[in-house]
Amino acid sequence: MVPHTRTTPAERRRALRERLASGRLLRMPGALNPLSARLIQDTGFEAAYLSGAVLAADLGLPDIGLTTATEIAARAQQTTRVTDLPVLIDADTGFGEPMNVARTVQLMEDAGLAGLHLEDQVNPKRCGHLDGKTVTPRAEMVRRLRAAVDARRDPGFLLMARTDARSVEGLDAAIDRAKAYVDAGADAVFPEALTDLREYEAFRAAIDVPLLANLTEFGKTPLLDTATLENLGFDIALYPVTLLRLAMGAIEDGLRTIAAEGTQESLLPRMQTRSRLYELLGYQEYSAFDSAVFDFTLPPGN
């Protein structure tokens, strides 16, 4: 059979919820394209993420709310086609008013995702670790979440609320918002841009649903290790842009080397080999499938 996912979206959603209920920290790298999602699975991780910042950057756009719901749903579907991991996606502010949020939820369900997170910023939004953010009134975010809950057709689809209020209104206000968001139906909470261990501890003490730690590089949050996050009682360690930064750094270095040396010869030891790429792509399985179809004949007498 041609390689594809062996599991259904419902099974992957159930797997994510069961994993979050296990009490063990879930490490979630951000995929930069469908092939990297397959590599995340092949490397032994148990979930993958699609970052709004990465999806925007892939289109050559800054992360300020310029992408559309249909653009990210298309990339999500391409990704869920090639991995059996549950995939969580960044749905920004929901791409409009509560009615738009409802449609966004159903688009993401149809794309085979395991869940999404919505944030309480005002459009045009900013990267969560930049200054100058503005958050919506709490009641507006509650309306977004209620619309998401009402629109969700599969109760297994995870709805996560992200709050950017820490750097705008302070820690206590961010915690109060998170409580309101859970009351509105959020299954999990993503407190953005926490700055130290005390803030992590305060969130864990106040919120009784799964919590996500955003370990993005070059931001306001310390790059905590998994043992520390487990001790803090957090449930997800997110590495949203790590693979994009690694890949773009390698690409930039490679281009400079070719420009300077006139050949890529010195870069060969740093490249993924052809055989490894073909292994990830499933060339052998595709070839076997093609041969079985090409060589097929009807049994005698039929």
Image: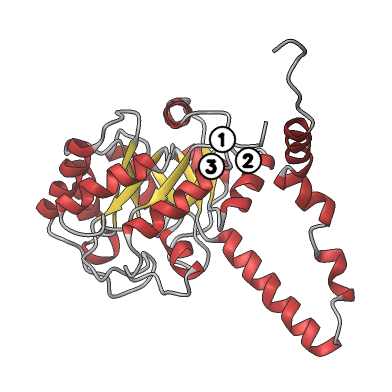
Crowd band around label 1 with a 10 angstrom C-alpha radius: few (<14), some (14–19), many (20+): many
- The three-letter code of the residue at mark 3 reads Arg
Front residue (pair 105, 253): 105
Name the residue tied to disc 1: 84
Q: Position of residue 146 (x, y in %)?
A: 16, 41
Circle 2: residue type: Gln
Q: Are marks 1 and 2 in contact (CB under 8 Å)?
A: yes
Up-down: is 212 above or below 84?
A: below
Check whether the beta carbons of the residues at disc 3 and disc 2 lie within 8 A of each other: no
Using the image as rendered, state which of residue 11 and residue 281 is in the foreground. Answer: 281
Q: CA distance from mark 3 to mark 1?
A: 8 Å
Question: Between disc 1 and disc 2, whose residue precedes?
Answer: 2
Query: Mark 2: which secondary structure?
Result: helix
Along the line of sight, the residue nearer the viewer: 17 or 107: 107
Residue 183 x %, y %: 17, 36
Q: What is the three-letter code of the residue carrying label 1? A: Asp
The residue most toward the front is 301
Label 1, label 2: how many angstroms apart (C-alpha)?
8 Å
Q: Residue furthest left?
A: 139
Q: What residue lies at 59% left-to-right and 48% top-to-bottom?
A: 37
Q: Is residue 293 left or right of residue 33?
A: right
Residue at the farthest bottom position: 260
Q: Which mark is residue 81?
A: 3
77 sits left or right of 125 in the view: right
Crowding at mark 3 (Cα within 10 Å: few <14, some 14-19, many 20+) = some
Q: Residue furthest right?
A: 265
Query: Would you name the residue on which mark 2 appears?
Result: 41
Which is closer to the viewer, label 3 or label 2? 3
